[in-house]
Amino acid sequence: MPEEPPGAEEIRVRFPVDDEELSRLHAEAFDHEFELTPWSERLARHSRSWAGAFVRGRLVGFVHAVWDGGKHAFLLDTAVAPDMGRRGVGGRVVAALTEDLRGSGVEWLHVDYEPHLEGFYRRACGFGPTRAGLLRLR
């Protein structure tokens, strides 16, 4: 694929999700085997909003925010196609999602991340530092 200039993608919020397309992006971004996931159903049921980046119709970036039904939402599944990494795509989908959540009743947007992603979430996306815990259940 020829290199696209930064910002050449189209950002869409709460777009109709193609389960296979998003499952493929997720598998590529997180380097795991493809598994068809019912994203449309999952997002409709649990997410307050989601955003995607598209280049020539191809989904190349995605993020969503699950919601507690009140003032808190949680950023999940930030994914960028490996061939589109380090071009600001992730930051732009997070910004679009954040903007869509403003005025929705959500007051706090939480995110947990591994240490190597601190620069992205703190500097590129504006999240402040906080401590969190994690317990693997399986």
Image (cartoon, grey):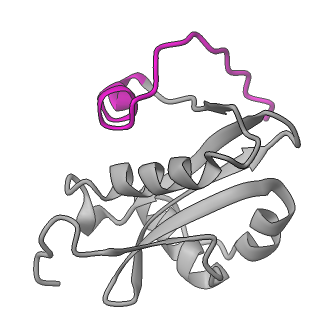
Quadrant of the rendering where the N terminus is positioned: bottom left
Residue drawn 11% across the image and 76% down it: 3
Regarding residue 30, the answer to whether it shows in the image is no
Q: In this view, does 81 lie above or below 9?
A: above
Residue drawn at point x = 81 percent, y = 68 percent: 44
Work out which residue is located at the far front of the displayed protein and give it.
Answer: 103
Q: Residue at x 67, y 15 (%)?
A: 133
Q: Which residue lies furthest to the bottom in this view?
A: 57
Residue positioned most to the top = 131
Judge whether 66 appears above or below 132 on screen.
below
Q: Does the magenta stretch include residue 134?
A: yes
Asked if residue 68 is positioned above or below residue 137 in the image, the reply reads: below
Q: Does the magenta stretch include residue 91?
A: no
Relative to the observer, which residue lies in front, 50 or 77? 50
The C terminus, quarter of image: top right
Residue 85 is left or right of residue 3, and the answer is right
Q: Which residue is drawn at 37% across and 26% down?
A: 122
State the image coordinates of residue 34 (x, y, percent, origin top left): 56, 72
Query: Where are the magenta residues, as a range?
Result: 115-138
* Relative side of 33 to 92, left or right: right
Query: Quarter-wise, where is residue 105 in the image?
Result: top right
In this view, the residue in front, 54 or 20, is: 54
Residue 132: name its quadrant.
top right
Q: Up-down: is 129 above or below 22?
A: above
Q: Can residue 111 be seen in this view?
A: yes
